[in-house]
Image (cartoon, rainbow, N blue to C red):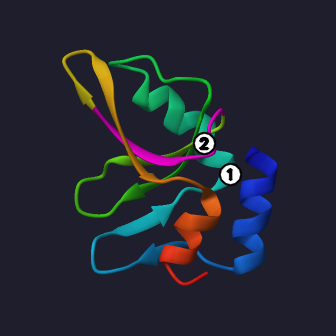
């Protein structure tokens, strides 16, 4: 899924998306592994979660759950990740931002 996501993102030519609820800055493909290392310092990052970016105001991570296809965010709470599903699919996510 990693290659497909970044190919799609590159094809769209976008580095961020924004609506009335949030602005998301996308991470470069070559920075994904480093981001996982950074996030795993406190709490282990799930290997099925593909980091795609960060929310502008809170710096919360945005990722694709590769098992379900959902686009989610997560924040660290009491030594675990609290996951919130934002969109049921990548297509729904991109459509919400006009793509």
Task: Please report the residue visible at 27 percent of the width from the left and 29 percent of the height from the top.
Answer: 76
In the rendered image, which quarter is residue 65 located in? top right
Asked if residue 74 is among those painted magenta in the image, a careful observer would answer yes
Q: Is residue 10 left or right of residue 83?
A: right
Residue 25's place in the image compared with 46, above or below, is below
Give the camera-side residue of 40 and 9: 9
Q: CA distance from mark 1 to mark 2?
A: 6 Å
**In the rendering, at what x and y percent does residue 29 appear?**
68, 51
For the residue labelled by badge 1, is the local secondary structure a helix, a strand or a loop?
A: helix
Crowdedness near tag 1: few (<14), some (14–19) or many (≥20) residues, C-alpha within 10 Å: some
Name the residue beneath numbered marker 2: 32
Task: Please report the residue visible at 69 percent of the width from the left and 68 percent of the height from the top.
Answer: 9
Residue 49's place in the image compared with 90, above or below, is above
Give the camera-side residue of 21 and 3: 21
Task: Please report the residue visible at 56 percent of the width from the left and 35 percent of the height from the top.
Answer: 34
> Given the current orientation, which residue lies at the most extreme front position?
88
Name the residue beneath numbered marker 1: 29
Circle number at residue 96? none
Give the camera-side residue of 96 and 56: 96
> Given the current orientation, which residue lies at the most extreme left position?
78
**In the rendering, at what x and y percent does residue 37 appear?**
50, 27
Q: How many marks?
A: 2
User: Quadrant of the image for the N terminus?
Assistant: top right
Task: Please report the residue visible at 32 percent of the width from the left and 19 percent of the height from the top.
Answer: 42
In the rendered image, which quarter is residue 99 located in? bottom right
For the residue labelled by badge 2, is the local secondary structure a helix, a strand or a loop?
A: helix
Q: Which residues are magenta?
A: 67-75
Residue 16's place in the image compared with 90, above or below, is below
**In the rendering, at what x and y percent does residue 92 appear?**
56, 66
Asked if residue 63 is among those painted magenta in the image, a careful observer would answer no
């Amino acid at each position: 899924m990693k290659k497909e996501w970044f190919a799609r993102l590159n094809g769209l030519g976008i580095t961020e998306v924004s609506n009335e609820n949030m602005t998301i800055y996308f991470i470069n493909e070559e920075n994904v592994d480093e981001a996982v290392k950074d996030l795993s310092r406190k709490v282990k990052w799930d290997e099925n979660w593909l980091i795609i970016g960060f929310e502008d105001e809170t710096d919360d991570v945005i990722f694709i759950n590769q098992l379900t296809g959902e686009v989610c965010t997560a924040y660290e709470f009491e030594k675990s990740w609290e996951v919130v599903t934002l969109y049921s699919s990548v297509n729904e996510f991109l459509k919400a931002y006009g793509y």
